[in-house]
Image: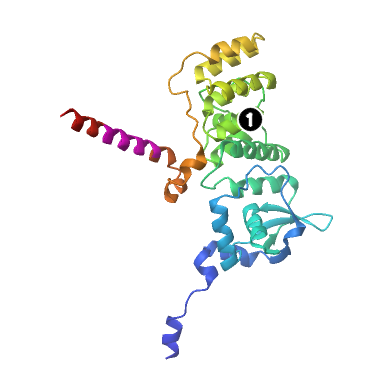
């Protein structure tokens, strides 16, 4: 009978939600319960914590099961802690009315903290270009401080072809760690030179990545001219136009009039239709939004509508 009871023993809740590697890691590290009020956010944390649908699901899960995977913090001299990994879990606890959170406390230098913070977040399924940009920049700087050679030059002209590097550099190591080329890492970091308004348009996929990289070489004043044109005329430069703008900027010949002239040139697929998200969101299935397939869904609906209209016109013509 005892043998039968042992066979029917159910797994613990933690066993259902964590991997063996995670459980082994937690055994090796001391897990503490720490007041959330004592945990400060990581300075200039590049990853956005949004109060979206996924956050609501996390809040619901934490209310029911608690925080399964501990967050990682480091102690500060004033007796508080700094969050390294777990900003979303901390926010969810605050929304759930929970005052304490399970933490792994690690003594880390500033550079070690930056590297662990980036590495803990960069592999998430959904990463915005702006998040990658600032995360890569922060980690590259930390790697530089640790003594690794960095070959990123802020004012170097971007090139479409990756140059072969004679030695292992920090930027090439960073690229390999994230399945990116060194040149792609440079391009992402260039995005940090965009004004916030243009960078937001990149995150919203209204400005394409490569043209945005070229725009990052323009002065702030000229970037605001671009933003104003986008806001009123809803047009953005193509890659070839962005390269022309950068060339004129480097030659000291870029004026507001020249920007308007280049931007107003007709380009296919550059006009945007304004849609009130609140009006259409209720008609989009949740699984479509979660899969980030809203655009495909809308196109499919329009195709079905056009098909019905054609059939209707054919019937009326008989």
Q: Is residue 286 left or right of residue 148?
A: left
Q: Is residue 176 magenta?
A: no
Magenta stretch mostly in which secondary structure? helix
Q: Residue 22 location in percent, x, y? A: 56, 62
> Vertical placement of 288 versus 73: above or below?
above
Can residue 146 be seen by looking at this rendering?
yes
Quadrant housing residue 216: top right
Residue occupying image coordinates x 46% and y 83%: 6
> Vertical placement of 318 versus 244: above or below?
below
Disc 1 crowd rating (10 Å Cα; few below 14, some 14-19, many 20+) is few
> Vertical placement of 311 versus 90: above or below?
above
Element on which disc 1 rests: helix
Q: Residue 302 location in percent, x, y? A: 35, 35
> Which quarter shows the N terminus?
bottom left
Residue reaching furthest left? 318
Can residue 167 be seen by looking at this rendering?
no
What residue does disc 1 label? 197
**Which residues lie in the magenta part?**
298-309
Q: Residue 188 location in percent, x, y? A: 58, 32
Residue occupying image coordinates x 50% and y 31%: 274
Q: Is residue 291 left or right of residue 203?
A: left
> Which quarter shows the C terminus?
top left
Q: Nearer the viewer, residue 300 or 262?
A: 300
């Amino acid at each position: 009978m005892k043998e039968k009871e042992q066979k029917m023993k159910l797994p613990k809740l933690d066993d259902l939600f964590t991997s063996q590697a995670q459980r082994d890691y937690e055994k090796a590290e001391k897990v503490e319960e720490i007041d959330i009020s004592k945990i400060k956010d990581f300075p200039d944390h590049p990853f956005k914590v949004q109060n979206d649908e996924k956050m609501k699901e996390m809040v619901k899960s934490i209310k029911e099961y608690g925080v399964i995977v501990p967050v990682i913090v480091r102690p500060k001299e004033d007796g508080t802690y700094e969050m390294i990994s777990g900003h979303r879990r901390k926010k969810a606890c605050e929304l759930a009315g929970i005052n304490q959170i399970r933490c792994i406390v690690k003594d880390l230098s500033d550079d070690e903290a930056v590297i662990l913070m980036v590495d803990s977040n960069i592999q998430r399924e959904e990463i915005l270009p702006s998040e990658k940009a600032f995360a890569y920049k922060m980690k590259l700087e930390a790697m530089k401080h640790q003594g690794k050679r960095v070959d990123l030059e802020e004012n170097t002209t971007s090139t479409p072809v990756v140059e072969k590097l004679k030695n292992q550099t920090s930027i090439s190591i960073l690229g390999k760690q994230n399945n990116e080329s060194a040149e792609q890492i440079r391009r992402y970091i260039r995005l940090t030179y965009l004004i916030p308004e243009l960078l937001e348009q990149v995150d919203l996929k209204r400005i394409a990545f490569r043209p945005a990289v070229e725009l990052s070489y323009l002065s702030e004043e000229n970037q605001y001219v671009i933003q104003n044109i986008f806001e009123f005329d809803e047009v953005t430069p193509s890659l070839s136009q962005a390269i022309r703008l950068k060339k004129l900027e480097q030659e000291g010949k870029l004026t507001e009039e020249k920007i308007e002239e280049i931007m107003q040139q007709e380009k296919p697929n550059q006009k945007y239709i304004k849609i009130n998200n609140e009006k259409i969101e209720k008609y989009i299935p949740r699984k479509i939004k979660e899969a980030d397939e809203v655009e495909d869904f809308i196109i499919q609906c329009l195709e079905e509508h056009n098909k019905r209209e054609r059939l209707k016109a054919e019937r009326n013509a008989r």
